[in-house]
Image (cartoon, rainbow, N blue to C red):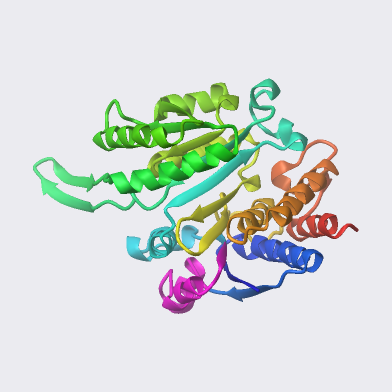
Amino acid sequence: MFKIAVLPGDGIGVEIVPEAVKVLKAIGRKYGHSFEFNEGLIGGAAIDAVGVPLPEETLRLCHNSDAILLGAIGGPKWDNLPVHLRPEAGALLPLRKALGLYANLRPATLYNALMDASTLKREVIEGIDIMVIRELTGGLYFGEKRREETAAGQCAIDTLTYTTEEIERIARLGFEIARQRKKVLHSVDKANVLESSRLWRETVTELAKEYPDVELIHMYVDNCAMQLVRWPKQFDVIVTENMFGDILTDQASMLTGSIGMLPSASLGGKVGLYEPSHGSAPDIAGQKKANPLATILSAAMMLRYSFNLAEEAGAVEDAVVRVLDLGFRTPDIMQDGGKPVNTEEMGDRVVEQISGH
């Protein structure tokens, strides 16, 4: 019995999460596994219901589960609340911290059926399969923040802090994953300017001695951003700090044509968190236009990383490939000749492929 905390959240979250649950149930039926799903409130939905973005009850549910499936949080409705009450700052960051989720894994894989959906030329992107590993609980996002009055007006200060231990643990994960793939690791920093990046580079370089079979390549973040567009096939595994990772993962996502296709996993503690890389998309919420495939693929990552069910994870991923090859498309990935489906229908097509009918 695997216990899964289900947190639909806001916007399209309540539409895409049920499709991933549907897929996990199909996997359970096919492979003889039992999943227990327990729903909780988070984000704007939690603010509206109980006044806070991350209720204690939700935090308890997460701690007592084997994995967490999250939809999306936030929206214009809650943008003007105090910072600590906003869905992102008041729910997602504290949840990552509370669960010790220091590593975000975000794959950017181009599916052959969607090659023409990318804005880049086919010869540039064909065959890309990149894993970006982002440090998730340090850096600017978690450093001290304050404002001071000066003669020139207000002065805002954000503190960027990293310790050797924080760098070493995320870099070690990068080396381990690179070792399982093509044995090439790009470590991305800004060591020509930032002291935190100089410590990052020194620490990663020292750790590399333990992984002589993995080629380590250091790259400045601005060059990495350029190279992702110029020649993305040079990358296999990228490891980087929090803010750089936040930016680069969104850029990498668009190599594949749609951020609606990209899953993610946040790991480090006993309970992993799995969510699509996209946001709550309030502009299309409630219209059944949302693409559930990123959430379904996040569920596949859950099977692989939290439950050690590699075959079952592969079955989900293969089902998604077959559905795309058959031409089924939600609006975000629609192409000439595509077969339009809504959110629920896309989930049903994946279930059909898993079930074999």
Foreground of the two, 38 or 209: 209
Judge whether residue 65 is colored magenta: yes
The residue most toward the left is: 151
Residue at 12 percent across and 49 percent down: it is 149
Could you say where residue 332 lies in the image, as x and y percent from the top left?
A: 69, 44
> Which x, y percent locates residue 273?
53, 60
Q: Is residue 56 visible?
A: yes
- Residue 351 screen position, x and y as percent: 80, 59
Residue 168 forms part of the magenta stretch: no
Quadrant in which residue 59 is drawn: bottom left
Does 236 appear above or below 305? above
Q: Quadrant of the C terminus?
A: bottom right
Above or below: residue 120 compared with residue 304: above
Residue 137 falls left or right of residue 287: left
**Residue drawn at (41%, 50%), measured in percent from left and top?**
136
Query: Horizontal and vertical percent for residue 42?
Result: 49, 69
In this rendering, is residue 335 above or below 126? below
What span is in magenta?
Answer: 41-69
**Residue at the image point whose x is 67% and y is 23% from the top:** 121
**Which residue is at the far right?**
357
Q: Nearer the viewer, residue 30 or 156?
A: 30
Observer able to see residue 82 = no
Residue 256 vs residue 149, the one in the foreground: 256
Q: Specify the quadrant of the image occupied by residue 18.
A: bottom right
